[in-house]
Image (spheres, helix red, strand yellow):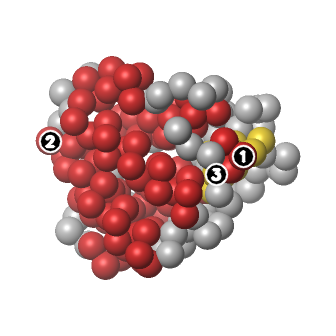
Amino acid sequence: MANLTELRPAHRRPSAARTPICRLTTGEALIVWAIRHWVQSVKARLDPRDLLRCGFATIEAEDVTDSVDRLLMITLHEATTVRDVGCVRCPTLGEGERDILQAVALSQRGRRDEALSVAQTWLPLSAALRAYDDIAAIGQALSGADMIVPMREDLQPEAWWIEGLATHHEGSALLH
């Protein structure tokens, strides 16, 4: 089980560049759902894999559960920067979620070096190299269900903003 001292509540206002969850594709939303429920389960000292397996069963991709778990465990233990992940009720995308979506989108397009560069924004090179296989597996699982994560401008750090969606709910976590 993860070192729970590394999961801390977010006590800062969210960035003005937060993408609304309602703007995500189904594949993107599934990844964000998995990340948020993984964090919630780990904070509650529960094994997240059974819940994630049920979620990925909806696209017949239960096998990707272990890749998601490994990617997030690597992030939890080796991140070099704090990762902002919303709680299950947060209406906007956290920077940590955004970066994982970017890496998955790049891997789906065979752009390994660029995906590794994105992963290195939160992981040291050795951890990013280990995490890449899991990032690619997530991308392949979504591709197998005809879900391509789009390359979009709003997943960049200087994204557009919709007024009124900056609500922060207690329970959001910063992963470091």
Amino acid type of the residue tagged 3 in the rendering: Leu
Residue placed under numbered mark 3 in the picture: 175
Mark 3 → mark 2, Cα distance in angstroms: 29 Å
Instruction: Locate residue 160: give its quadrant.
Output: bottom right
Question: 10 Å neighbourhood of mark 3: few (<14), some, or many (≥20)?
Answer: many
Q: Nearer the viewer, mark 3 or mark 1?
A: 1
Seen at 21% across and 43% down, the residue is 141
Residue placed under numbered mark 2 in the picture: 144
User: Height in image: 99 above or below 115?
Assistant: above
Amino acid type of the residue tagged 1 in the rendering: Thr
Q: Where residue 64 sits: x, y (%)?
A: 26, 40
**18 with respect to 128 (left or right):** right
Amino acid type of the residue tagged 2 in the rendering: Gly
Residue placed under numbered mark 1 in the picture: 5
User: The C terminus lies in which quarter of the figure?
Assistant: bottom right
**170 with respect to 39 (left or right):** right
What SS does tag 3 mark? strand
Question: Are dots 3 and 1 in contact, CB under 8 Å?
Answer: no
* Front residue of 135 and 124: 124
Instruction: Locate residue 52: give its quadrant.
Output: top left
* Front residue of 19 and 101: 101
